């Protein structure tokens, strides 16, 4: 018993010592785990605080935007000069020309003392009448004077950073103002302006550097810049069509086709045809034309069409000249017609097409050589009807086709027409996807070819043929 008792006591002591050691070890282990947890929490708090401070001083949006816009297979670390800049607006340097080249034609009392800005730019006159259709040069200039907003082109004041150079010479307004009949004594003033302008440009280092290739020159009137056109045949020309230009001067690969500025009011008031239950039936006239029937070249078709279409109660074909009152009459006529006839004028195009578009009247285009604005982005066949000159002169051909035109197809084209009409609006300030921004985007599309030509010219021993 004594031995057994001793052994029992020793066992109990040993067990107690062992339990004490385990308790101490367990306590130390828990303390160690607790310490590690505290350290981890402190580390994450420090990391979050550091990230917050960094995010407060650096905006990561451009970096992530660049990552998202990179094409597949291209690393974000690439420093190639060929990286895409498609998202950037076109950088345009605008020459600071004396006002006699532009604004003074609108306001003869305008002074050259202060620079032209968005604040002192005169508005385009509401009473300009038919001159308005050739005012593209004004709207392009105005867009560069205004900062802010979503724009396809921005003005830069450092020519070294420019992608293109804008020449703010109102060549169309100059023709309309200084002897538009070409025999007036004032016509000489238009010629002298062109001579002075070319002397100015040819003395510019930036014109010399590219041979004028990266210079943007508007001339939407078919007689604009007519005295010295050959001296700007390498530039990016803004034209309404190619009817008056030789192939070696103007062509699609370097020039931009612009819409005429419409002269009728746009159909967008409250209670317009959007609220009409049945617009097809509400437009009672089948085919509408109102304009000058005495034209040159392809435009001679107008007289022939007048004879072919005469005597039809669902056709309105009327000889007319552009006056303020006649423009109002045409506005109402187009809005009440299903189809609006657009035969060629003195050149393949005319303002009538764009008047029809903003009137939501399906254009019927008769012109074998017409070039259309923004056609790389817009499919005109979705909202226009096309006939060749030969088809149009076949008796009854046009009317038979239009009278049998399915209502469902017309309604679809009418909806498409309304959806694209904002691309043909010239306004200040410009709005997203309007005509001004569309034109600058077209210019931007030409810049790669311009750079190609400039780079080739720097290493060629024989100049290109157009110089």
Image (cartoon, helix red, strand yellow):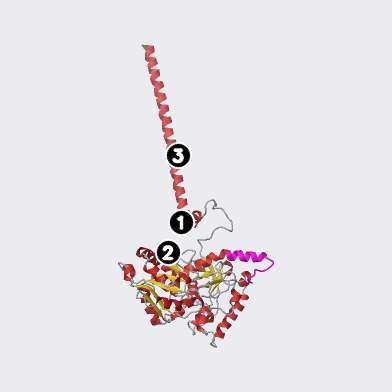
Mark 1, other Cα within 10 Å: few <14 / some 14–19 / many ≥20: few
Q: Which residues are magenta?
A: 449-467
Mark found first going from the N terminus, 3 or 1: 3
Q: Quarter of the image holding residue 451?
A: bottom right
- Alpha carbon distance from label 3 to label 1: 30 Å
Which residue in the protein does label 3 denote? 36
Tell me what residue is drawn at x 62 percent, y 66 percent: 454
Q: Secondary structure at mark 3?
A: helix
Q: Name the residue that disc number 1 marks.
A: 56
The quadrant where residue 415 appears: bottom left
Label 1: which secondary element: helix
Neighbour class for label 3 at 10 Å: few (<14), some, many (≥20)?
Answer: few
Q: Which residue is mark 2?
A: 382
Residue 29, image x and y in percent?
Answer: 43, 33
Label 2 secondary element: helix
Tell me the quarter of the image containing the C terminus.
bottom right
Residue 453 lies in the magenta-colored region = yes
Q: Is residue 444 left or right of residue 310?
A: right
**What is the distance, in whole Å, between disc 1 and disc 2 at their CAs?**
50 Å
Residue 329 at x, y percent in the picture:
37, 79
- Mark 2 surroundings: few (<14), some (14-19) or many (≥20) residues within 10 A: some
Does 21 appear in magenta?
no
- Image location (x, y in percent) of residue 124: 45, 78
Please tell me whether mark 1 or mark 2 is closer to you in this view: 2
Any part of residue 427 in sight: no
- Locate residue 211 relative to residue 399 in the image: left or right: right
Which residue is most to the bottom? 185
| Residue at left offset 47%, top offset 51% | 51
């Amino acid at each position: 018993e004594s031995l057994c008792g001793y052994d029992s006591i020793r066992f109990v002591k040993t067990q107690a010592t062992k339990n004490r050691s385990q308790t101490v070890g367990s306590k130390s282990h828990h303390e160690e785990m607790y310490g590690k947890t505290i350290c981890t929490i402190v580390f994450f708090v420090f990391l979050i605080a550091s990230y917050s401070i960094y995010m407060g001083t650096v905006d990561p949006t451009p970096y992530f935007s660049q990552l998202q816009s990179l094409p597949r297979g291209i690393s974000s670390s690439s420093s190639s000069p060929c990286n895409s800049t498609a998202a950037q607006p076109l950088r345009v340097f605008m020459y600071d020309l004396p006002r006699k080249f532009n604004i003074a034609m609108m306001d003869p009392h305008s002074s050259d003392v202060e620079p032209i800005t968005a604040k002192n730019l005169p508005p385009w006159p509401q009473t300009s009448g038919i001159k308005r259709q050739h005012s593209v040069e004004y709207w392009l200039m105005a867009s560069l004077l205004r900062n802010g907003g979503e724009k396809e082109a921005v003005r830069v004041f450092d020519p070294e950073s420019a992608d293109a150079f804008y020449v703010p010479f109102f060549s169309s307004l100059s023709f309309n103002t200084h002897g538009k009949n070409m025999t007036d004594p004032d016509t000489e003033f238009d010629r002298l302006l062109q001579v002075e302008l070319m002397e100015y440009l040819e003395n510019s280092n930036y014109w010399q550097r590219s041979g004028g290739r990266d210079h943007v020159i508007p001339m939407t009137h078919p007689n604009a810049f007519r005295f010295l056109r050959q001296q700007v045949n390498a530039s990016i020309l803004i034209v309404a069509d190619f009817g008056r230009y030789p192939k070696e001067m103007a062509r699609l690969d370097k020039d931009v086709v612009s819409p005429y500025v419409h002269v009728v009011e746009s159909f967008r008031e409250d209670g317009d045809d959007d609220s009409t239950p049945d617009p097809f039936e509400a437009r009672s006239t089948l085919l509408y034309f109102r304009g000058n029937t005495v034209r040159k070249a392809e435009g001679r078709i107008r007289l022939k069409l007048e004879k072919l279409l005469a005597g039809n109660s669902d056709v309105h074909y009327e000889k007319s000249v552009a006056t303020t009152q006649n423009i109002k009459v045409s506005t109402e006529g187009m809005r009440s017609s299903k189809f609006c006839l657009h035969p060629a004028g003195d050149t393949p195009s005319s303002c009538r097409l764009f008047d029809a578009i903003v009137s939501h009247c399906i254009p019927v285009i008769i012109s074998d050589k017409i070039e259309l604005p923004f056609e790389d982005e817009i499919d005109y066949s979705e909202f226009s009807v096309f006939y060749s000159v030969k088809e149009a002169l076949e008796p009854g051909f046009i009317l038979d086709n239009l009278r049998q035109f399915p209502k469902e197809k017309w309604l679809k084209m009418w909806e498409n027409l309304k959806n694209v009409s904002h691309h043909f609006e010239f306004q200040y300030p410009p709005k997203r996807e309007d005509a001004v921004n569309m034109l600058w985007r077209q210019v931007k599309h030409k810049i790669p070819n311009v750079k190609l030509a400039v780079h080739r010219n720097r290493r060629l021993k024989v100049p290109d043929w157009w110089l």
